[in-house]
Each structure stands twice: as C-alpha cells, then as structure tokens.
Amino acid sequence: MERFFKYTLAVLISTVAAIEFYQVVMRYIFELPVMGLDEILVYPTLWLYFLGSVNASREDTQIKANVLDIFLKTDRAKLVVRIIADLMSMTVSFWLTFWAWDYFKYALRVWKESPTLYIPTFYAECAFFIGMGLMTLYTAWHLIRNVRQITVISYEERTLQWKS
C-alpha cells in the first residue's frame, strides 16, 4: 500500500506541476492561453488532495496539536487522550463521509460535464467520497489499534498488581 501511495502521489503532483507550468509558459510568455487546461487540472488536483489526505490518515501523520502529551506522564494517559481524539475524529469523519455519499449520488445522477471539453466532472467529484471513506476506515483502524494497546497496558498493570 505504501508503494501505491508513493508512486501515485508522485505522478499526480508531477502532473499538476507540469500542467500548471505549461499553462503559465503559454499564457504569460507566448500570450497564447490554452483553453480547457484549467478544467483538466481539476482532476489530478482533487485526486492528489484526497489521496494525500488518505495517506496521512493511513500513516497517522495528520497535523495534530498534542499539547496534552507534554503534561501527561504515563503511556496509559496518553493512550486515553488518543482514543478520545480518535473517537471525535471518527464522528466527524463518518459525518463527512455520509455527506460525501449524498454528493456522490447527486454527481452520478446529474452527470455534469466540464464547460469547454465536456469531460464528465463525476470522475473528479467522486474523489471526495472515496477519500473520505478511506480516511474513515483508517481512523477506525487507528482507534481499534489504540483500544487494543490500552487493553494490553491495563492487563499488564493488573498482572503487576496481582504479583506484588
């Protein structure tokens, strides 16, 4: 999975940069704007944005403000805070995925096309639902992992108390 994200995100960001570079050169140097290039740019940009977010969820490297970790001394307390944060993330993520599903159904039903090139916009718009769905799954996976860790820590603490 790591290889998939590594190469896919590299291709997408290279595509976005190349298209944007071409547009800037054509528009500002040669004064020949390429019609429809901005419409094409929407597709890799949206997929780059959402797949990058999914990758951050997969790696659990989203931007966080873990201020409480400075004040908490035990691993158990830090895990409790992470579990609470994961529960809140799950709630928001599930809610946004539900909205994305409604938008996905709408985009499929309406089947809009871009104004100049007549490319179906559904292929860009479905990135929102797919991305949110995957982010929700990875958030659930991290929640389950943290709950398992706190269960192991609790078991070890009870075992140590029983032995003493």
Image: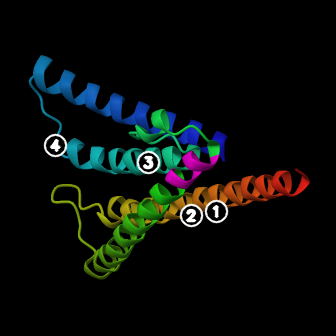
Task: Name the residue at the front extreme.
Answer: 164
Residue 68 percent coordinates (x, y): 43, 41
Residue 96 lies left or right of residue 143; in this view the side is: left
Instruction: Find residue 55 and name its label.
Output: none
Q: Earlier in the sequence, mark 2 or mark 3?
A: 3
Q: Which residue is mark 2?
A: 140
Residue closest to the eye, 6 or 160? 160
Stretch of the chain drawn in magenta? 76-81
The residues bearing labels 2 and 3 have C-alpha atoms spaced at a distance of 15 Å
Relative to 64, say whether 125 is above or below. Answer: below
Residue at disc 3, secondary structure: helix
Q: Which residue corresponds to mark 3?
A: 53
Q: Nearer the viewer, mark 3 or mark 1?
A: 1
Answer whether labels 4 and 1 touch (C-beta < 8 Å): no
Q: Earlier in the sequence, mark 4 or mark 1?
A: 4
Question: Is residue 154 inside the magenta stretch?
Answer: no
Closer to the camera in the image, 91 or 138: 91
Relative image position of residue 101 (x, y in whole percent): 37, 75
Vertical placement of residue 75 versus 128, above or below: above
**Mark 4 or 1: the one toward you:** 1
- Indicate which disc, 4 or 2, sits on the residue closer to the N terminus: 4
Mark drawn on residue 35: 4
Q: Which mark is residue 144?
A: 1
Instruction: Provide the major secondary structure of the magenta segment.
Output: helix
- CB-based contact (under 8 Å), mark 2 and mark 1: yes
